């Protein structure tokens, strides 16, 4: 049986799933509202409801396991509250302590840099500028704990306002727009 492989631009406000199996999430928007794919397609990894960007979909369990392994880089472009300092960037690079499943966890070293240009990011209203300045960062990690990037930036004093995943390994978001789908070769 041939497997299917897709990349999508998951829009803000959608869960990274096709079927809702939980009563408490009854009114949430699902990917099945945007994409009508074969029933055996699954999301590879997740992006929370308030995050957006690159999400891979497949019917191949081996591909899914490979991509979610800690050997694959995931790059995020992140808008944070405030003008981030060099010391906060240094802390993020070396690893910070966050809570995962009620336990303390030290994140692995990662690549963090300030984004000077953000014209590749599709504009979306986040908040009124009167609420303060913001910074855009590129954060590349090889792990993927629950809300890890958001917890990392908050830990160093710069809460995440917007999070866009732009790359998973060799797969890039490129010029895709929210709600767009494309076939990938594996």
Image: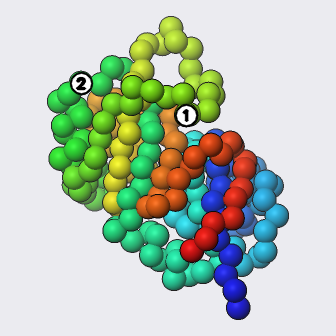
Mark 2 and mark 1 lie on one chain; the one further toward the N terminus is 2
Compared to 66, does 179 lie above or below? above
At a point 62% along the width and 24% down the height, the residue shown is 125
**Percent from the top left, x then y, of residue 135?**
39, 24
At a point 22% along the width and 52% down the height, the residue shown is 109
Disc number placed over residue 85 in the picture, else none: 2
Q: In this orientation, which residue lies closer to the viewer: 168 or 108?
A: 168
Q: Check the picture and name the quadrant holding the C terminus.
A: bottom right
Check disc 1 and report the residue beneath it: 120
**How many residues crowd around disc 1 within 10 Å: few (fewer than 14), some, or many (20 or more)?**
few
**Callout 2 secondary element:** loop
Q: In this orientation, which residue lies closer to the viewer: 139 or 118?
A: 118
At a point 56% along the width and 14% down the height, the residue shown is 128
User: Is any part of residue 42 visible from this angle?
Assistant: no
Q: Would residue 68 appear left or right of 11 to someone viewing this image?
A: left
Q: Would residue 17 appear left or right of 140 to someone viewing this image?
A: right
**Cβ atoms under marks 2 and 1 closer than 8 Å:** no
């Amino acid at each position: 049986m041939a497997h299917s492989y897709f990349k999508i631009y998951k829009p803000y406000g959608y869960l990274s799933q096709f079927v809702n199996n939980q009563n408490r999430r009854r009114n949430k928007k699902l990917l099945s509202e945007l994409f009508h794919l074969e029933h055996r397609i699954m999301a590879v990894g997740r992006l929370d409801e308030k995050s957006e960007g690159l999400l891979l979909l497949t019917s191949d369990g081996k591909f899914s396991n490979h991509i979610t392994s800690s050997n694959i880089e995931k790059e995020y472009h992140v808008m944070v509250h405030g003008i981030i300092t060099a010391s906060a960037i240094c802390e993020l690079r070396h690893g910070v302590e966050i809570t995962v499943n009620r336990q303390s966890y030290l994140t692995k070293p990662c690549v963090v840099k300030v984004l000077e240009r953000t014209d590749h990011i599709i504009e979306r209203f986040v908040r009124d500028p009167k609420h303060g300045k913001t910074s855009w960062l590129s954060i590349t990690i090889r792990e993927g704990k629950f809300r890890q990037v958001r917890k990392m930036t908050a830990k160093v004093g710069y809460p995440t306002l917007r999070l866009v995943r732009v790359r998973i390994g060799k797969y890039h978001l490129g010029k895709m727009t929210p709600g767009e789908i494309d076939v990938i070769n594996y």
